[in-house]
Image (cartoon, grey):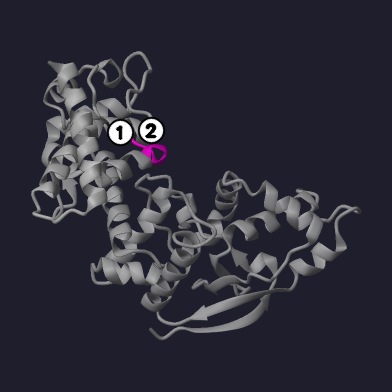
Amino acid sequence: MTIKTKEISVALDQLMLDPNNYRLDEGLDTEEYSDDQVVSLQDETKKRLRKSNIAELEASIRINGFQEVDRIVVRELKVTSDLCNYLVVEGNRRTAAFKSLMDQMRNPETGVYYSDASRELIEKSKNIKVILITGDDEDIKGFSHRLMGIRHVSGPRQWGGYQSAKLIDDMFSSEGRDYGRVADLLGMRPNEAKQKHEAYKAFKQMQNDPEFGAKSNTRIFSLFVEMVTSHSEFKNNWLGWDSDAAKFTNKEHLYRIYHAITKNDDGIVEIKNPADMRKASLVVRNDFARSEFERGVALDDIEVDLEADKRERRIRNFINFLHGGYEFGEGEIQALVDLKTLLASITEDDE
């Protein structure tokens, strides 16, 4: 990767907000905007960024000034203009907050600053130190992915789950489809990168579904994380996860889940959160509960001890342990005697 960086000084008006910013992606299949479209989309992009809660940033800038400890990162915008403009790669929210604050300080019709506008902020808006990155398009794209990943996926300013997963999907394609490579670049475990990516693919599968696509939104993304991180009986056997195609293949069971995570005719959602999805995954491990769930009985109406299978597995694991032929010590023998007494009382109660 041939990337060069240097510090330069620019005016606030030269900084162009990125309409392709991951934070703005709400899971819709929107187009990727070219450099030629960026300038004309500035007002719309600023409005969209305002929805990401930049009011606190505005207040901080108003009180403390625009701090440059954490530099904004930019690349040159490839458009013909009288003014050299720069696309913000990292720092879009801070830039949007500064721009919004400056807009509030001037007359919208004349552009003249009000008499009580901060002279310090006005001067700062004319001279902001930023980090300029240069290189070919692919190098800049790769560097941008890594920078955003370090800061917003595994770093201190984390995005929502969907935005993080989308970045991983982009990096997975550009980094040789290697989870180990992506994980190393983002500072996370390979299995974590794989799970986030599978959740993204599962979400996109619903989004592309002709019946349920219109009902999908990023607010339910955490449910897909739970689906792909669940036990194999639920994920692989019941839903039919195909790791090569990165999608669920049992359409009947998948639609049962889709119905459960979207509003029914009465406006009720059966599976509202990851805890509900975990319950659904336990339900399919129990023959009776699974048949009830598959025929449409609501999750809350299925009365069965869902922890019984888990307890049985623990007991059978302990039995297998005892069959290991160990030579137990005196303390262990006494513990087994105590266990024998306990087992006798339990089995007597059941007779």
Which quadrant holds residue 311?
A: top left
Residue 293, position as x, y percentages in the image: 19, 22
Relative to 301, 293 lies left or right: left
Q: Amino acid at mark 2?
A: Asn
Instruction: State the SS at label 2.
Output: loop
Residue picked out by circle 2: 273
Relative to 241, 258 lies left or right: right
Question: What is the tally of numbered marks visible in this picture?
Answer: 2
Spatial CA span between label 1 and label 2: 7 Å
Identify the main secondary structure in magenta: helix
- Nearest the viewer among 68 and 344 is 344
- Residue located 21% across and 54% down the image: 329
Residue 165, position as x, y percentages in the image: 36, 54
Instruction: State the SS at label 1.
Output: helix
Residue picked out by circle 1: 277
Relative to 213, 8 lies left or right: right
The 10 Å Cα crowd at callout 2, few under 14, some 14 to 19, many 20 or more, is some
> Is residue 46 something that shows in the picture?
yes
Specify start and end residues of the magenta stretch as a single range: 216-220
> Is residue 254 something that shows in the picture?
no
- 153 inside magenta stretch: no
- Nearest the viewer among 308 and 156 is 308
Which quadrant holds residue 220?
A: top left
- Residue located 16% across and 17% down the image: 350
- Nearest the viewer among 111 and 312 is 312
Q: Quadrant of the N terminus?
A: bottom left
Residue 112, position as x, y percentages in the image: 83, 56
Relative to 216, say whether 62 is above or below.
Answer: below
- Residue located 30% across and 35% down the image: 278
Q: Quadrant of the C terminus?
A: top left
Q: Are marks 1 and 2 in contact (CB under 8 Å)?
A: yes
